Image: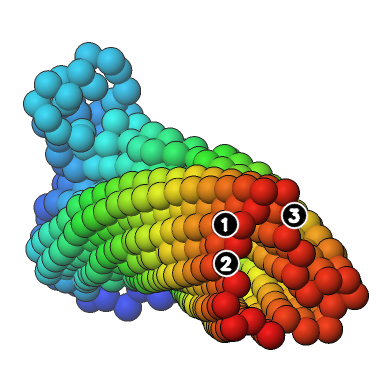
Amino acid sequence: MCKHDFMHAEMMEPNCSLSHIVRVSPAVPGSLGAALQAAEARTCLVLEEGVFIEPNPLLVAKQGISISSASKSTLVVSNFDDTNAGSLIRIVARDVVIKNIQFEILVDNAASDQSNKDKGCMGQSCLAICADSDAEIVECSFTAKRGYGVEICDSSTPKIVDCDVNNCTCGIIVKDRASPLVRGSKLHHCRDACIKLAGVSTGVVEDNTIENSFEAGVVACGRSTSTVKNNILRNTTGCGFLLLEASRVICLNNTVGGKHINGLQAGEDSDITFQSNTIEGSEGSGIVVHDSARGFFFGNEVKGTKMAGVGVRDNAQPIMSGNIITGGSGSGVVLVGSAGGVFTANTVSGNKCAGVGLKGHTDALFEGNIIKNNDGYGVWLQDDVRGTFQGNVIEGNKMAGMSVNHRAAPNVRSNTIKDGQQVGLLLQNEADGVYCHNTISCNLAANVLLMGSSKCTMSENTIMRSPGGGVLIRGQAYCKLLRNNIEGNSRANFAVLDQARPYAEGNIIQDGDGRGIVVTGTSRGHFKGNMILGHGLAGMYVGGDAEPRGEMNV
């Protein structure tokens, strides 16, 4: 069943320096199991080329066992019923090394698969590493069509290096308190996830290629705090990364591409650190944060998504800083439901719809972002949105730089809204809010347009150089304009039409090619203490049935 040939074994495995070296032949079924049972601690088992058929699960329980082969075609397979949900090989000892061997579970029939489902179990695993084992698994392959390729559990700390895990229900599962290193491996063609991080697991997953899964490339759940870095994820069908429960994983410098719906989906109570990753070509969104998830997203690039580059919904509250969201077929960043969060120093550009869109009861902080050259609105707010926008640059968008609709009432401070192809700031319906210390300039249709029954307070803004006009108030809009500098706009610097009724006090309205103030229709309004200077036409024109009230204007 096995024979001693020390000289030949050393030739086959020159790195083997253990006290016992045993060659194992595949000629008789169960030979590897018998060799493991007979082996003493620190024995090196050198497998001859061939197929080892094992009718019973294999157990490595002695310290320092090494199993290797000089041939990459050496295959160890099980032919025992997978309804016992056992493992082809189970390691519970320390200092174990397995190198250059293929492992495969052969059972693949509908009856046994249904039995596993009825019992609520996953099926077998090719390899299970348990207890406090620190096994090293190098250049091996694992195939388990009805179970896990590698199961890492308890407090084990193994190294899985340069391996191939394929055609499994789940490629690798890490659970309990396990803390493995998974490096340089290829995980592919898995029905659910290529790797699942569960329990309170830690460890590092790095420099792997993860592809062709059905649910996700990487799933994190439980309270895992594993680090996933420098991996390539592609063609993961559902998600590149899927975060559930209270997972706290750290994802650094990964690339997600190929066919997938969402690049990253973080839900439930997860709290991810997601930094310097690239997500490209998502058929859904690049990043989705939902439920009560949080997370820190820094320095990522999301490009070419079919839907929103970043979608935040429900009660999620992420922090997003320094990200680039560009070239999507939808909007750049979309918040819905009661979502919130902090969005700082991001660049949102070149998207087919709005750069940033908020709906529902969302309330977030947007500070220091660049929102530019989007085919739709720069910023779109609707429903009952609140939130603060400060210090952003909103420029070159094809529709309004900022459009505020329905009952939305943001706090908009110290932004630059410029060079838009339509209106700079647009309020309509019953929109409200406070707008102060902004610079709104060079927007093609008008710098500011207030419509419907909108109402707001605009104070200490600079509104200048629009070929379409400075501030235009229409419909039944009511607003307060206090201490603004409205200057250098073509047509009128300040026009009031329809039934609008603004209150304007302490504004400087100057240097326009047309009129300073135009009041017409049946509009009303109170104009107090304004300075109206240097216009090509009349400083103030009143027409139609308008009846404005003027007081102490110059």
Quadrant of image for the C terminus: bottom right
Q: Residues within 10 Å of mark 2 (few under 14, many from 20)?
A: few
Amino acid carrying label 2: it is Arg
Q: Is residue 179 visible?
A: yes
Q: Residues within 10 Å of mark 3 (few under 14, many from 20)?
A: few
Amino acid carrying label 3: it is Gly
The residue that mark 1 highlights is: 524
The residue that mark 2 highlights is: 549
Classify residue 408 by image quadrant. bottom left
The residue that mark 3 highlights is: 543
Mark nearer the N terminus (1 vs 3) = 1
Q: Is residue 128 above or below residue 39?
A: above
Q: CA distance from mark 1 to mark 3?
A: 11 Å
* Left or right of 464, for residue 387: left
Quadrant of image for the N terminus: top left
* Left or right of 76, for residue 347: right
| Numbered marks: total | 3
Classify residue 427 by image quadrant. bottom right
Amino acid carrying label 1: it is Arg
Classify residue 437 by image quadrant. bottom right
**How far across and down, in percent of the image, does residue 42 sit?**
19, 72
Q: Secondary structure at mark 2?
A: strand
Q: Nearer the viewer, residue 262 or 114?
A: 262
CB of mark 1 within 8 Å of CB of mark 2? yes
